[in-house]
Image (spheres, helix red, strand yellow):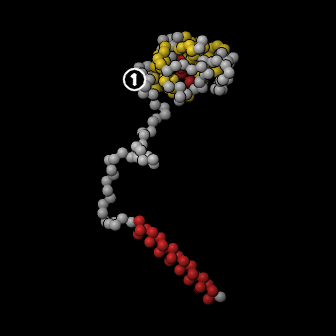
């Protein structure tokens, strides 16, 4: 019995030596020619994407859009489905996502024309903190929050102008956007 154990151990030892030798060979094949040389300083060349082109800087998704003007304003990003409340220094004091209406405002600058504390929306939903800023296709466009707190996708067969937000965001909008406040819509 001792003979078969020693043969087994010898076989394992030989296999282990072969694996170590193979790994050593792989390591030496990938080592630089002169391992005593100092590493090169990082290149100042621009980094490239996997496709070979320059990498684009990562944009902060909550940053105020650069094409949205200056000063205190409400910025509504149509593509991003996001609103920024921007102070006089150009800093966002509050930002939040919204559910767009079926009728969209054209990109441009507007002013808040009317406000309502609580009404029934064009979709029949009880809403609050309504801040209107334009009319498109005979539909009033503005921000509002559903009293029940929902943000449902609007019925595409109906012409609605309510850009819906959560109730807490509606509170912030109501405080920020009084009559005459600037509203900038960006693509």
Q: Position of residue 29 (x, y in %)?
A: 41, 68
- List x then y, in percent, for residue 55: 42, 43
How dense is the environment of label 1, judged by Cα within 10 Å: few (below 14), some, or many (20 and up)? few
Compared with residue 95, is residue 57 higher up or lower down, i.e. above or below?
Answer: below
Q: Position of residue 132 (x, y in %)?
A: 55, 14
In the rendered image, is residue 129 in sight?
Answer: no
Classify 101 as above or below 117: below
Asked if residue 142 is positioned above or below residue 95 in the image, the reply reads above
Can I make out residue 128 in this image?
Answer: yes
Q: Residue at x 59, y 85 (%)?
A: 7
Q: Residue at x 53, y 80 (%)?
A: 14
Badge 1 is on which residue? 89
**Percent x, y for residue 89?**
39, 23
Judge whether 54 appears above or below 175 on screen. Answer: below
Q: How many labels were placed on the picture?
A: 1
Residue at image location 36% in from the left, 65% down from the top: 32
Q: Nearer the viewer, residue 60 or 3?
A: 60
Quadrant holding the N terminus? bottom right
Q: Which quarter of the figure has residue 161?
A: top right
> With 48 as the anchor, is 134 left or right in this view?
right
- Secondary structure of the residue carrying numbered label 1: loop
């Amino acid at each position: 019995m001792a003979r078969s154990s020693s043969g087994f151990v010898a076989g394992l030892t030989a296999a282990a030596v072969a694996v170590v030798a193979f790994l050593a060979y792989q390591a030496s094949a990938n080592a630089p020619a002169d391992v005593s040389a100092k590493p090169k300083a990082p290149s100042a060349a621009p980094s490239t994407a996997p496709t070979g082109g320059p990498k684009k800087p990562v944009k902060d998704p909550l940053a105020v859009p650069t094409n949205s003007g200056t000063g205190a304003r409400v910025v509504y990003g149509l593509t991003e489905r996001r609103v920024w409340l921007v102070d006089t220094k150009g800093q966002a004091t509050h930002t939040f996502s919204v559910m767009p209406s079926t009728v969209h405002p054209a990109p441009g600058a507007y002013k808040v024309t009317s406000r309502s504390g609580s009404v029934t929306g064009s979709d029949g939903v009880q809403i609050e903190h309504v801040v209107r800023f334009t009319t498109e296709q005979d539909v009033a466009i503005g921000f509002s929050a559903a009293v029940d707190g929902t943000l449902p996708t609007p019925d595409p067969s109906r012409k609605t102008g309510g850009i819906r937000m959560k109730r807490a965001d509606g509170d912030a909008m109501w405080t920020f956007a009084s009559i005459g406040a600037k509203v900038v819509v960006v693509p």
